[in-house]
């Protein structure tokens, strides 16, 4: 899948390069007419959402500040029945289950970008810089029901995972200029560094018996630690807008 995405992005960029060669830009639209201190916004659309701002110092190097964002949320609720078979017979227990999962990730990085191959129609560049990251994952679960022996039972759990990271980002990319102010790019990213994790979870159980005292319990779990990490994104595709 990653290989297919890479070849697809390469095909798109090569097509744009070819169109620029077939339909050359007018002199007013060429690279040489670009201001040196050009402000550029890059919008990442495939393999992760991000927004970056570039401030050009010269035609071959620039500085970039980038914010990466990711989030997800799922929720489901089900009504069912559990069946217990024993020597005393068969019992059916109606029950309800609710589950929800959410996650969010943020990363702020700064890059120095150098274009080692640059023409009027596009460029190939590389860069590097520091990054700070934060991620949060949470899972909630609630189960409840009734039975012949137990009037009411319920259980719930709440799991939260937080991750903080500091590292270095390496970038290799290529960009095709569609117009003087619009382009399309594909980038490969390598990120590595140090991270710290914190896990917290709480689970509880309640059983309400008709002829005896109720039973309840609560378990709390906490763990924290750190380690090294690295990850690679083979291709990210987006559009570039200059003003």
Image (spheres, helix red, strand yellow):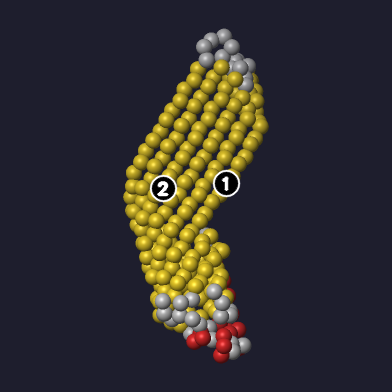
Residue positioned 46% across, 63% down in the render: 66
> Where is residue 148, by image quadrant?
top right
Q: Where in the figure is residue 24, as x and y percent of width and height?
A: 59, 88
Q: Where in the figure is residue 145, as x and y percent of width and height?
A: 61, 24
Residue assigned mark 2: 163
Q: Nearer the viewer, residue 235 or 113?
A: 113
Can the viewer see residue 6 in this picture? no
Residue positioned 54% across, 74% down in the render: 243
Residue assigned mark 1: 73
Q: Which of 198 and 212 is in front in this view?
A: 198
Residue positioned 47% across, 46% down in the render: 136
Left or right of residue 215, residue 84 in this image: right
Residue positioned 43% across, 51% down in the render: 134
- Quarter placement of the N terminus: bottom right
At mark 2, the secondary structure is: strand
Eyeballing the image, is 53 above or below 68? below
Q: Which of 128 and 210 is in front in this view?
A: 128
Eyeballing the image, is 26 above or below 214? below
């Amino acid at each position: 899948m990653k290989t297919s995405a890479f070849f697809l992005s390469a095909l798109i960029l090569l097509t744009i390069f070819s169109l620029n060669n077939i339909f050359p830009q007018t002199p007013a639209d060429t690279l040489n007419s670009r201001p040196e201190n050009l402000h550029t916004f890059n919008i990442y659309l495939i393999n992760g959402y991000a927004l970056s701002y570039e401030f050009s110092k010269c035609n071959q190097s620039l500085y970039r500040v980038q914010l990466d964002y990711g989030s997800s949320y799922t929720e489901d609720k089900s009504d069912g029945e559990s069946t217990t078979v024993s020597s005393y017979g068969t019992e059916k227990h109606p029950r309800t289950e609710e589950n929800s999962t959410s996650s969010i990730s943020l990363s702020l990085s700064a890059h120095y970008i150098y274009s080692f191959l640059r023409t009027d129609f596009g460029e190939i560049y590389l860069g590097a810089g520091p990054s700070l990251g934060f991620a949060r994952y949470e899972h909630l679960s609630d189960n409840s029901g009734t039975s012949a022996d137990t009037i009411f039972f319920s259980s719930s759990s709440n799991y939260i995972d937080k991750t903080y990271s500091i590292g270095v980002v390496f970038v290799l990319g290529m960009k095709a200029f569609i117009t003087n102010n619009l382009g399309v790019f594909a980038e490969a990213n390598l990120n590595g560094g140090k991270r710290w994790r914190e896990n917290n979870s709480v689970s509880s159980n309640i059983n309400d018996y008709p002829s005896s005292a109720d039973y309840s319990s609560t378990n709390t779990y906490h763990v924290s630690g750190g380690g090294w990490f690295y990850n690679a994104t083979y291709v990210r595709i987006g559009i570039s807008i200059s003003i």
